[in-house]
Image (cartoon, rainbow, N blue to C red):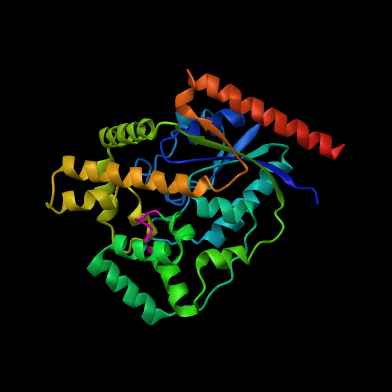
Amino acid sequence: MNRIPVVAVVGPTASGKSDLAVEICRRFNGEAVSADSMQIYKGLDISTAKPTEEEKKGIPHHMMDFLDTRESFSVAEYQSMAGECIKDIHSRGRLPVIVGGTGLYIDNLLNNIRLTEASFDEALREKLLRRVDEEGIDSLLSELEKIDPEYAAKMHPNNVKRIVRALEVWYSSGVTMTEQIENSHAESPYEVLYLGLDATDREYLYSRINLRVDIMLANGLEAEARDYLSQPDMSTSSQAIGCKELKPYFQGEMTLSEAAENLKQATRRYAKRQLTWFRRNKEINWLFIDTFSSKDEMYEKAFAITEEWERRLQDVQK
């Protein structure tokens, strides 16, 4: 089987994945394929930290900014659409570069996981959703952590839909989502090089997250969140980090400064969960952003790893 070469740039939020992916694309004739469950939505530009046209540096970016916020989108749909993007990029002699922090998307896509659909239990789901309203999603996430810690580690606490679905599957079938995934592997059509970004000093990463929130607010996050939360029939997009955390401020329950601190805390927790998940992947080549004297030095290290990977692939094909 001739597998398609793919580079995957992964890691926590605010670690610099988008910038590195662009530089990899520029150096190795690539195109970026987003693996972010919120960047798929149109209009949520600031809250999801979509790269600007200037930041893209002319590199095509796929799987981004194409879905209306009132529409839902499944992991299976992502896997199918992103897979077609990869085939198209490869067919044109270019390198597909996956970039993002949604581990569920990345794993299902690159490991070619085929999920079997457990039966839906509408009554159970309604009960779980009522509990979200009464107890808060953190309570259900803590419950999921006890039942299925591996899957819970991948969940953003704002991802109500998938947390509820995981509990629904467990209580209706006795099978965890992790077990379902492990039993659903097929041969992957991809030869993947994983590049991961992290920091040796957790506070260094957290300071980058705090700064990013400040910049988002300065760039108009408040107006973007207010606009989208005011629209009817919102889907998963209403759970985008930056929207939910500002809602108490819009309702007069706290100051903007307090809401901003809550947003920073939620984002730091999300980054911790992302790292917990990605660190289990032993194939990731980690680059620690606080150990380089400059971005260019880190890029050169990433280039060297990618060049060696390409040489190995060429040797195998000879």
Answer whether residue 72 is visible to the viewer in this image: yes
Q: Is residue 92 left or right of residue 117?
A: right
Residue 17 x/y as whole percent: 49, 35
The picture places residue 188, in percent across and down from the top left corner, at 70, 54
Q: Which of 219 and 171 is in front in this view?
A: 171
**How far across and down, in percent of the image, does residue 202 sit?**
38, 35
Which residue corresponds to the image point at 65% horizontal and 47% vertical from the top-left?
A: 86
Which quadrant of the rendered structure holds the C terminus? top right
Q: In this view, does 275 lie to the left or right of 318?
A: left
Residue at the spot 24% in from the left edge and 67% down from the top edge: 135
Whether residue 43 is visible, yes or no, is no
Q: In this view, does 150 lie above or below 294?
A: below
Q: Is residue 314 left or right of residue 169?
A: right
Q: In this view, does 274 lie above or below 152?
A: above
Total number of numbered discs in the rendering: 0
Measuring from the top left, give residue 254's x and y in whole percent: 13, 48
Name the chief secondary structure element in magenta.
loop
For the point 30% across and 64% down, the residue is: 139
Compared with 104, 300 (above or below) is above
- Residue displayed at 30% across by 35% down: 210
Extreme-right residue of the structure: 318
**Start and end of the magenta stretch?**
156-160
Extreme-top residue of the structure: 293
